[in-house]
Amino acid sequence: MKTTRRKFIANTAKASLLTAIGAPLLTESVIACAPAASAINTPQAFQFSQDALGYGYDSLEPYIDAQTMEIHYSKHHAAYIKNVNEAIAAEKIAATSPLEFFVSVSKYSSKARNNGGGAWNHNFFWSVMKPSATAVAPGGKLGEAINAGFGSFEKFKEQFTQAAMTRFGSGWAWLVLKDSKLLIGSTPNQDNPLMDVSDFKGKPLLALDVWEHAYYLKYQNKRNEYVSNWWSVVNWEEVSKHLA
Ligand code: MN
């Protein structure tokens, strides 16, 4: 929006007057230029928020048990959200979106990096799962891209499983799009492929949490069983949307 200097001065004067008499600062021109009303009222324009789960804690049974889902969502994920927003406020991080946050994450504290990753990764993870998913190979553009990239759906699953199994300690396995190609990789801790610090980069299409908190109650040390059962709850329609 183009504002003439004269108009700007007039609006500024009007705003000062309104402020002086205790009226809200929102003149019409300010509203028209503002990104969102909420951004004006808070010192930080961007905070992470926890997406609604979209299904019940017990909806992914028997593959992922209700108790694990409840603790994972209401304790672990909720804590990442709370902690990253504390870091954003304390460090006055001026990112306006998760993408902006992650491309500059090397400049922030480890609290911001770890909890920012935890906040975003889990929102993404919940969205790529659903109850009574079809365990069959996805069709359409995604199916073609998987066949082109890995030879077959079975080979894709093998490679993804290997990434999940060989991630030592805590971390994530990913399918990403990079330079029009599908790639499989993994990241440590709560890092993700959007982060400037990550060795493995790309646009996330699918993610699997391989932290022990994601499976230990039901599977204990058997990460392979967790991964193998997890294919039964993958929401391929959602994964396809990220490819579009
Ligand atoms: Mn987790």
Image: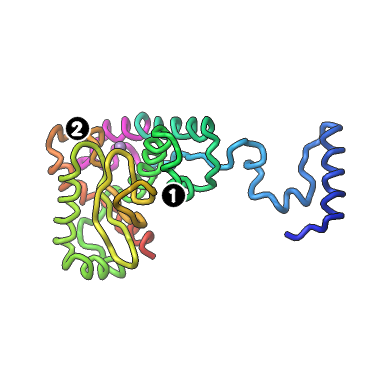
In the image, 205 versus 193, the foreground residue is: 193
Q: Amino acid at mark 2?
A: Tyr
Above/below status of 101 relative to 3? above
| Residue 136, image quadrant | bottom left
Nearer to us of marks 1 and 2 is 1
- Looking at the rendered image, the quarter that the N terminus falls into is bottom right
Question: In the image, residue 196 lies at what x, y percent?
Answer: 39, 49
Q: How far across and down, in percent of the image, does residue 2 sit? A: 76, 60
Q: Mark on residue 158?
A: none
Q: Residue at x 25, y 63 (%)?
A: 138
The quadrant of the picture showing ligand 1 is top left
**Residue in the image at 15% along x and 50% along y:** 162
For residue 26, above or below residue 83: below
Q: Which mark is residue 216?
A: 2
> Callout 1: few (<14), some (14-19), or many (20+) C-alpha neighbours within 10 Å?
some
- Left or right: where does residue 29 sit relative to residue 214? right
Q: Secondary structure at mark 1?
A: helix
Q: Relative to 168, is 173 above or below?
A: below
| Residue 72 covered by magenta stretch | yes
Amino acid tagged 1: Val
Disc 1 versus disc 2: distance between alpha carbons?
Answer: 32 Å
Q: Is mark 2 within 8 Å of ligand 1?
A: no
Tell me if residue 113 is in the magenta stretch: no
Mark 2 residue element:
helix
Outermost residue on the front side: it is 107
Highlighted magenta segment, given as a residue range: 54-74
Please name the residue that numbered disc 1 is placed on.
103
Examine the image and state in which quarter residue 176 appears: bottom left
Rate crowding at label 2 as few (under 14), some (14 to 19) or many (20 or more) other CA atoms within 10 Å.
some
